[in-house]
Amino acid sequence: MPHGFLERLLQLAYEEDVGAAGDITTMALVPEHVWGEGELLAKEALVFSGAEVFCKAFMHIDERVQINMLAVDGQACEKGTCLARLKGPMRALLVAERTALNLVQRTSGMATFASRVRKAIEGTQLRVVDTRKTSPGLRMLSKQAVRHGGLHNHRFGLFDGVLIKDNHLAALNGSIQEAVLRAKQATHGLLKIEIEVSNLEGLKEAMAAGADVVMLDNMGDEEIAKAVAVAAGRVLLEVSGKVEVERLSKLAALGVDWVSMGALTHSARAVDMSLNFRPAAMGQKAL
């Protein structure tokens, strides 16, 4: 993670949750000197992701919190697995609890879904990648979770890859040739040029213009098969648009190179975890 990224993310998270007044309930009920301990448990089978942000969510509130992570990123865990043990000032544990869970349940949910997709394409050459369809501010954690689930990342943002979409073409009166030419000139040949097309004519134009990757957007299997024949390995073909897990084996058999799935990050269900605390044994503050 880039230096300071998680700290900025957590600062925003606590600004909206704790605010200027603090955790009113915890401050009213829990004496400052009380220490607590507890466990993070998996309440369903999952692939874990988010160890670093989970730990920092607590230490951001109080550096005295001690965490023993028992699960590592990318680990498949059965229901009932103890993922981490915690000990520290009870106030800090209670303040950080929801923020830490919100983050790790979502990242582990993405990793779990990505693992399911990976298993669906085992034994094939198909490469499944994510998209920019992530919650603002959570892209780095989301794309990391996809990797923890065994899949791959597409470009991170607008700054590190060229992807010419239909709305870009609309700004150039639909000229694929002009769009690819401008992109090549602007990047001085240092980046691959990808362009989205919706039919075979668009694919042929993109190939003639010198595109490196062509995204076949919302095409049916029959048309994709024709596109693979037209491309004949001269450009990478990426399929995008409402791809379900059940369709992946068919797309692999058709011979496309990549499939991009926005669902990996925007539709993955948060997994179920529990985080339960109790007063720590007197005089035992170390794990």
Image (cartoon, rainbow, N blue to C red):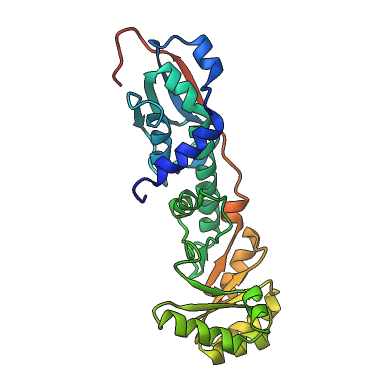
Q: Residue furthest bottom?
A: 208
From the top left corner, tell me how far across and down residue 61 is, in percent.
Answer: 41, 28
How many numbered markers are drawn? 0
Query: Relative to residue 129, is residue 82 drawn left or right?
Result: left
Q: Is residue 37 above or below residue 168?
A: above
**Residue drawn at (48%, 54%) of the image:** 143
Q: Is residue 273 above or below residue 258?
A: above
Q: Residue furthest top?
A: 282
From the top left corner, tell me how far across and down residue 242 is, in percent.
Answer: 67, 63
Q: Quadrant of the C terminus?
A: top left
**Residue drawn at (48%, 11%) of the image:** 30
**Residue drawn at (44%, 24%) of the image:** 39
Q: Is residue 79 visible?
A: no
Q: Residue furthest front?
A: 20
Q: Is residue 264 above or below residue 200?
A: above
Query: Relative to residue 75, is residue 252 drawn left or right?
Result: right
Q: Is residue 257 visible?
A: yes
Q: Is residue 56 above or below residue 142?
A: above
From the top left corner, tell me how far across and down residue 109 is, in percent.
Answer: 54, 44
From the top left corner, tell me how far across and down residue 49 is, in percent.
Answer: 45, 44
